[in-house]
Amino acid sequence: MSDTAVTVQYRVVFAKKDEVADGPDDAALVVSVGVADVGLDPTVAFMQGKLKAAGPTGALFDLLKSGAMPAVLAKLSAR
């Protein structure tokens, strides 16, 4: 599977067992961040351990480089 074909699920966590998700449940890459950290640059949040990712690291780095992540996370944080 190439990185361009990787599916992504975004999750914004509001509290324990309270999160909003966007993307397929069987996504190869799952990105999670707390609502308080949505305003941070995603690359900085990842390096600080505030943005978590499960899946292929190369695909995560491609996604971070694309600049598409902040808009999706902001939309989810607005509920």
Image (tube, rainbow, N blue to C red):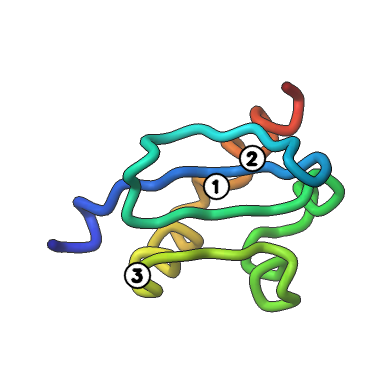
Task: Tell me the crowding category of disc 2: few under 14, some 14 to 19, or many 20 or more residues within 10 angstroms, Cα based.
Answer: many
Q: Which residue is mark 3?
A: 56
Residue type, mark 3 in image: Pro
| Left or right: 28, with 21 as reference point | left
**SS at mark 1 in the image:** helix
Percent of width and height locating residue 75? 65, 28
Q: What residue is drawn where x is 65% and y is 30%? A: 76
Side of 7 where 2 appears, left or right: left
- Disc ID at residue 73: 2
Label 3 element class: loop
Kindly report the distance in space between the C-alpha atoms of the residues bearing marks 2 and 3: 19 Å
Q: Secondary structure at mark 2?
A: helix
Q: Which residue is mark 1?
A: 69
Quadrant hosting residue 15 = top right
Q: Quadrant of residue 60?
A: bottom left
Q: Are marks 2 and 1 in contact (CB under 8 Å)?
A: yes
Q: Residue at x 69, y 37 (%)?
A: 19
Q: Nearer the viewer, residue 4 or 7?
A: 7
Question: In the displayed image of the protein, which residue is found farthest to the right?
Answer: 36
Q: Residue at x 13, y 62 (%)?
A: 1
